[in-house]
Amino acid sequence: MSDLQTRLAKRIEDKRDDLIELTQELIRIPTLNPPGENYREICTYLGERMARSGFAMEMVRAEGAPGDCTKYPRWNVVCRREGTRAGECVHFNSHIDVVEVGAGWTFDPFGGELSDGKIYGRGACDMKGGLAASIIAAEAFAEECPDYAGAIEISGTADEESGGYGGVAYLAQKGFYDPKRVQHVIIPEPLGVDQICLGHRGGWWAEIETFGEIAHGCMPFLGDCAVRHMGAVLDKFEDTLYPAMAARHTEMPVIPEGARQSTMNINSIHGGQNEQAADSTALPSHCVPDSCRIVIDRRYLAEEDYEGVSGEVKDLLEGLRVTRPNFEYEMRELNHVAPSMTDKEAPVVQTVARSIEAVMGKKVRYVASPGTYDQKHIDRIGKLKNCIAYGPGILELAHKPDEYVGVDDMIDSAKVMAHALAQLLTDEV
Ligand SMILES: [Zn+2]
């Protein structure tokens, strides 16, 4: 173990209480998305914290991005600390937003309670714990190696949970991820302290609507039931599409294993009359539905392409138009994200792999994420390929009730991040 590694580890251990308090305070700012609450508050909090550690802070509002409005402005913060000489810039990016709370909690979702070495709350693992760990790592490193080269950046960005258009995508459009400005990006999403996430699968979201004709429910033969047409679509998915997707496997090291193939979720189905309010006692009237809609969420592999993925659904629907009487449909694309994979030999990958081995004493495991995250924007818009996700926490806890992050995990990952900074910005390790 190098002398600097020992000193960095000690400094991070000494900051354990600070790390806990920082994580708790971040959780206590409820940055729910939707609608996008308290972004300004958390960015201000982060900026002031980082200013005390010698970082310059820049607040950036994503004006005109989806969801940005006077009531819910999409604020982001980018904090930068320059070294004493020229060198590379290492950027840690964390999203500040959290998803809805949902049912089933035994802890206060915005209490940040510490219990048995774990901090509980919505966003604890996804990803305020990772944000806090990267801050502690950067501060410990800057204190221990004040004479470092290059620069360190910490950003807190909006809307990752809803696509990142008011966050990283906006910053990338503004040049914040220009490879001339930033050379290495680490996103502390909860992928585990001894794993490096190289990228993610692609996603394609679409709404399909089938049409019919309204008539009295006692004489359905005088109308045309759009829900039955949708049933035929779902049958086609079961008979043809799902078996075809299950047969496709990937070289991407996606975790969990079940996601190492193509998958598709049917998010929602709506047909016929609107559902009545929960407190209504009225009975429905009798009508044949003339419209039925589903939303599909298709996740795809690096070995597939967008044209193939959208084309096979379109082909199934076109097939039904030929074989099924009166079958009419429309398909509307809602969103599309291409897969992203960083090369295993990329500098940030190799650096963090060495740091994991030095700090954790074990061989790194390379993984890929089943869902997308902000790497897509850094890759496609920023044109910066040297990017990974690495951070504390257990991915399966994300978006669940009683979400937590382990304090020891945060400490370990902070040591790895500080060690990586030492490799990239000093000659000492
Ligand atoms: Zn996340």
Image (spheres, rainbow, N blue to C red):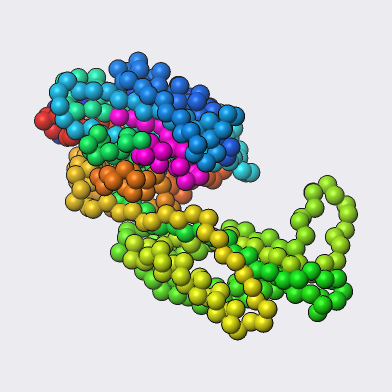
- The residue lying furthest to the bottom in this view is 323
Q: Quadrant of the C terminus?
A: top left
Q: Nearer the viewer, residue 133 or 379?
A: 379
Q: Quadrant of residue 267?
A: bottom right
Asked if residue 62 lies in the magenta stretch, the reply is no
Q: Which residue is pictured at 65% across the width and 62% down the height?
A: 293
Could you say where residue 181 lies in the image, as x and y percent from the top left?
25, 34
Instruction: Say above or below: 146 vs 291.
Output: above
The answer to whether residue 71 is left or right of residue 252 is right
Q: Nearer the viewer, residue 255 or 54?
A: 54
The answer to whether residue 352 is left or right of residue 134 is left
Q: Quadrant of the N terminus?
A: top left
Q: Is residue 87 visible?
A: yes
Q: Which residue is pictured at 34% across the width and 25% down the height?
A: 79
Asked if residue 163 lies in the magenta stretch, the reply is yes
Could you say where residue 206 lies in the image, as x and y percent from the top left?
54, 60
Q: Which residue is pictured at 50% across the width and 64% down the height?
A: 264
Could you say where residue 354 lies in the image, as x and y percent from the top left?
19, 43
- Where are the magenta residues, as a range? 153-173
Q: How many marks?
A: 0
The answer to whether residue 121 is left or right of residue 58 is right
Q: Nearer the viewer, residue 173 or 19?
A: 173
